[in-house]
Image (cartoon, rainbow, N blue to C red):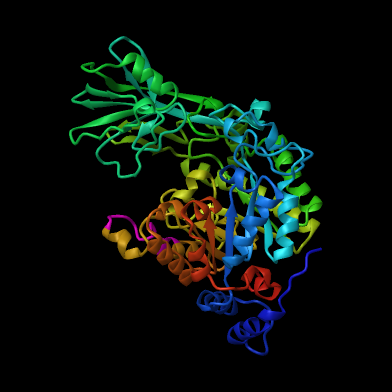
């Protein structure tokens, strides 16, 4: 059983509890919980300092004991107290010796080749070396993502019956020669084999990478063809037109079927339900409802908690892929059982999809709210099973998750990460949606403050809601969690590339508004050589979730 060394933090804890709890009261109550959590936000010595070690991005930095030692030495020097080690990534491959999941050395994904020997147990090596440095280790499990669609590799392809099924409505781009290709979307991220239409409204930067081809269209006529994969050039979006951008098979279609002067037709559309391996996204999701899937994922969590001396389990991608999943026969049957009635028009009674000049638009059907509620119910139940399992093995193991902080949109993933006492005032939320908030189950939650604007005022001036900022996202997170657990804001370093001072500002804003910070990811600290920034901005601290006395303050009476 894990023990927690807290002698050096007793003064902080005593101060917080004295400020929060009357001398005659010892049990947690709403008032004392509020004061304790609020005081932790303001206390500099009680913050969680977490660094995420992504597996795929750091293969060369973690493929030997010597390499791990070097990374952990830097981590310790940067005042990080906990690392989240990605031991099962989105492809379903693992970096430890598992009785259930395939080892990453067996993957056929090209970028994984030659790094990990078949017997290499990254988790065990990290645990041994982290212990020597006083760093805690939480094992991160990508739960319902089980494969790479790019390379058709992973457990989702060994078990195709597990795959999610997507409600896939697409516009169809037709060429003069009679050929056609499905349009994945308008002003969205271009995925594997996807054809995307980019209009002047798109503001993302960079818009796409070079691994594709693009056709510039003005007045429905192709004016330019660029093969970015060979030239390295990316087309400029014309003010009076758009760009058709294709990756993989879509790139081939553009190059083989379009030429300058051709007229293109984007008015056609079609709707179908397809398995995950036919859906244009990089990760292959499985259906959380399949008993075999749930058993498989729980077995992985069980072996991590029993075979390894980890300090905690972190669930990642413990969700649906997006709003369009899952529409399998199994999901229809389960949903009908949930509502106690048959769905007369499937999937139209859930929602229909129309197309506008700006892209897809979902038109809710009569069962839309209930469907959103039901999906959150399914994920809630899995979290309950997983937490019960983890705590039955060792009640001192921490149980947490990563989610995006964009709560008003996160229902798309079938997740309610807020508290059961939080009642969202949103058009998609049913009266019972709040019942399936899982924040109350967690020892802490990491929410991604993945925004380029830092202050709420910056977001407003950019024409966005105030929560689309580091500060606003932190406030949205604490509001939705509603003091059910500790909130650690997470920063994505790629968004601060070439701007270390903005990164410093983001760190300070996060620490000023949440109970701690998670830095994503190790790879960017190495690329940008920003370790010194963490050393200067993060203070040696004591993560609040590591203290049982403080943790009890977040538990319901």
> Is 303 placed left or right of 521 in the picture?
right
> For the point 80% across and 56% down, which residue is it?
393
> Is 85 placed left or right of 101 in the picture?
left
Where is 453 relative to 116, above or below? below
Q: Residue 300 or 53: which is nearer the viewer?
A: 53
> For the point 71% across and 50% down, which residue is it?
65
In the image, residue 503 lies in the stretch drawn in magenta? no
Q: Residue 375 or 195: which is nearer the viewer?
A: 195
Can you see residue 60? yes
Residue 179, quarter of picture: top left
Residue 208, quarter of picture: top left
**Residue 437 x %, y %:** 57, 56
Q: Residue 109 or 160: which is nearer the viewer?
A: 109
Range of residues picked out in magenta: 462-473
> Is 62 placed left or right of 472 in the picture?
right
**Residue 22 x %, y %:** 63, 88
Q: In the rendered image, which quarter contains the C terminus?
A: bottom right
Where is 481 relative to 433, above or below? below
> For the point 69% across and 35% down, which residue is it?
105
**Residue 111 x %, y %:** 57, 34
Can you see residue 270? no
**Residue 506 x %, y %:** 42, 64
């Amino acid at each position: 059983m894990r023990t927690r060394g807290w002698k050096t933090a007793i003064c902080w804890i005593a101060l917080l509890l004295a400020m929060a709890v009357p001398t005659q009261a010892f049990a947690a109550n709403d008032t004392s919980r509020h004061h304790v959590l609020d005081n932790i936000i303001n206390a500099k010595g009680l913050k969680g300092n977490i660094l995420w070690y992504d597996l795929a991005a750091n293969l060369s930095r973690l493929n030997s004991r010597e390499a791990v030692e070097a990374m952990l030495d830097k981590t310790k020097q940067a005042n990080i107290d906990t690392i989240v080690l990605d031991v099962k990534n989105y492809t379903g491959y693992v970096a430890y010796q598992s009785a259930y999941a395939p080892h990453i050395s067996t993957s056929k994904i090209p970028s994984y080749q030659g790094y990990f020997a078949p017997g290499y147990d990254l988790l065990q090596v990290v645990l041994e070396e982290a212990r020597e440095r006083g760093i805690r280790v939480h094992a991160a499990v990508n739960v319902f993502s089980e494969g790479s669609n790019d390379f058709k590799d992973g457990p989702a392809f060994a078990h195709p019956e597990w795959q999610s099924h997507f409600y896939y409505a697409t516009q169809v781009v037709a060429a003069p020669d009679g050929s056609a290709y499905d349009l994945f979307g308008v002003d969205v991220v271009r995925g594997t084999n996807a054809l995307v239409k980019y209009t002047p409204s798109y503001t993302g930067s960079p818009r796409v990478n070079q691994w594709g081809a693009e056709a510039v269209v003005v007045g429905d006529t192709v004016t330019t063809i660029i093969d970015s994969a060979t030239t390295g050039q990316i087309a400029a979006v014309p003010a009076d037109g758009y760009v058709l951008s294709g990756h993989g098979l879509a790139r081939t279609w553009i190059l083989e079927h379009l030429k300058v002067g051709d007229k293109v037709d984007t008015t056609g559309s079609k709707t179908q339900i397809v398995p995950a391996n036919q859906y244009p996204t990089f990760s292959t999701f499985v259906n959380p409802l399949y008993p075999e899937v749930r058993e498989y994922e729980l077995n992985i969590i069980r072996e991590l908690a029993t075979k390894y001396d980890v300090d905690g389990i972190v669930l990642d991608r413990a969700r649906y892929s997006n709003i369009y999943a899952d529409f399998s026969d199994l999901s229809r049957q389960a949903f009908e059982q949930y509502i106690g009635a048959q769905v007369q028009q499937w999937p139209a009674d859930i929602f229909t999809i129309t197309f506008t000049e700006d892209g897809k638009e979902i038109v809710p059907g009569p069962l839309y709210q209930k469907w959103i509620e039901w999906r959150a119910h399914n994920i809630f139940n899995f979290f309950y099973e997983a937490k019960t399992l983890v705590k039955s093995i060792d009640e001192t193991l921490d149980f947490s998750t990563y989610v995006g902080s964009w709560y008003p949109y996160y229902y798309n993933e079938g997740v309610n990460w807020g508290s059961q006492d939080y009642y969202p005032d949103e058009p998609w939320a049913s009266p019972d949606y709040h019942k399936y908030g899982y924040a109350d189950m967690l020892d802490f939650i990491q929410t991604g403050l993945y925004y380029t604007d830092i202050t709420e005022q910056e977001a407003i001036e950019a024409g966005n809601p105030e929560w689309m900022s580091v500060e606003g996202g932190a406030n949205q997170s604490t509001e939705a969690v509603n003091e059910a657990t500790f909130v650690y804001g997470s920063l994505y370093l790629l968004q601060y590339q070439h701007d270390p001072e903005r990164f410093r500002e983001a760190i300070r804003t996060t620490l000023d508004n949440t109970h701690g910070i998670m830095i994503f990811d190790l790879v960017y600290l190495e690329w940008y050589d920003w370790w010194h920034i963490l050393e200067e901005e993060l203070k040696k601290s004591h993560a609040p979730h590591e203290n049982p006395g403080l943790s009890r303050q977040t538990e319901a009476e």
